[in-house]
Image (tube, rainbow, N blue to C red):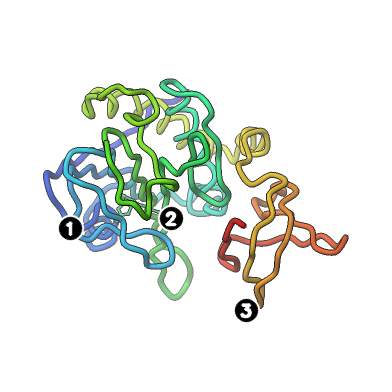
Amino acid sequence: MNKCDFTILNFDSIDSTSTYLKRTYKEQKDLTMVFASYQTMGHGRMKRVWVSPKGESLLFSILFKNKNIIDNFSSLSLLGAVTVFRFLSKYVSNVSIKWPNDVYVNNKKICGILLESISYSEGIEALVIGIGININTKNYPSELINKATSLYLETNKIFDLEVLKDDLRPFLEEMVNLIINNDKGYLEIVRNYNYLKNKVVKAIINEKEEEVVVLDINDDNTLLVKKDNKTYSLSMGEVTLHEL
Ligand code: BTN
């Protein structure tokens, strides 16, 4: 595996590691990685707010300007989830991947991933992947108690975030190498640890809400679902999932 030339920036507090990279990408090098202890305007998919108390999570974003990576961007969300899956599996069992880009432990979300692109008229100029992993959080508000978890809640241990950052690095290096080489091996892990497999979910397809059964993940990263004995392939941008 080649070593990657990450440039690492650390912030105590920032609006959002992803917003920072999107704002400054022109002057940043490819593979700049931004960590923050606290985000004042962290955000997730569907414009949701991503809140994390100070010093309790790994919050970071990586900028990709390399053309090979940009060309393979459709793999990056799931590959990011597989990367976090591998990393967390060092510390805890029962880790699974929820298509398109969340990581779960014991049926609760421990990590969210957001892939954003910076486009110009001729295509995508850069990608920013933002990752939030819940590490030392001890309590969640009542509305999240059954939905969110942290490494602390799963193991009863407090983790040193600086040590975890170092541990994470080889996993991120592997992620970069796999995507540059367009290696599809990650799909096997997504399929074997597919949180949604055989679950009934509500999917909003073409503005209509349908109940579908999740069958598998296709080679092109779409979700294979079944409804009334017909199968459909759902792509990431077109569907919102609600578990029943
Ligand atoms: C989601 O589950 O909706 C995705 C959440 C992504 C959160 C991370 S935290 C680091 C980076 N900065 C952000 O503002 N968002 C991502």
Q: Which residue is mark 3?
A: 207
Residue pictured at 73% horizontal, 60% vertical:
212
Are discs 1 and 3 less than 8 Å apart at CB? no
Q: Amino acid at mark 1?
A: Thr
**Which residue ends up furthest to the left in the rendered image?**
12
What x and y, as percent, mark residue 216?
A: 72, 46
Q: Position of 213 compared to 46: left or right?
A: right
Residue pictured at 26% horizontal, 24% vertical:
159
Q: Amino acid at mark 3?
A: Glu
Q: Amino acid at mark 2?
A: Leu
Q: How many marks?
A: 3
**Which residue ends up furthest to the bottom in the rendered image?**
207
> SS at mark 1?
loop
Residue pictured at 47% horizontal, 72% vertical:
122
Mark 3 or 2: the one toward you? 3
Q: Which residue is mark 2?
A: 115
Which comes before the other along the chain, label 3 or label 2?
2
Q: Position of 221 compared to 169: left or right?
A: right
The one nearer the camera, 221 or 42, is: 42
Q: Which residue is mark 1?
A: 40
- What is the quadrant of the C terminus in the image? bottom right
Choose top left, top right, bottom left or bottom right for residue 154.
Answer: top left
What x and y, as percent, mark residue 156?
A: 32, 23
The one nearer the camera, 66 or 187, is: 187
**Which residue ends up furthest to the right in the rendered image?**
229
**Which residue ends up furthest to the front in the rendered image?**
142
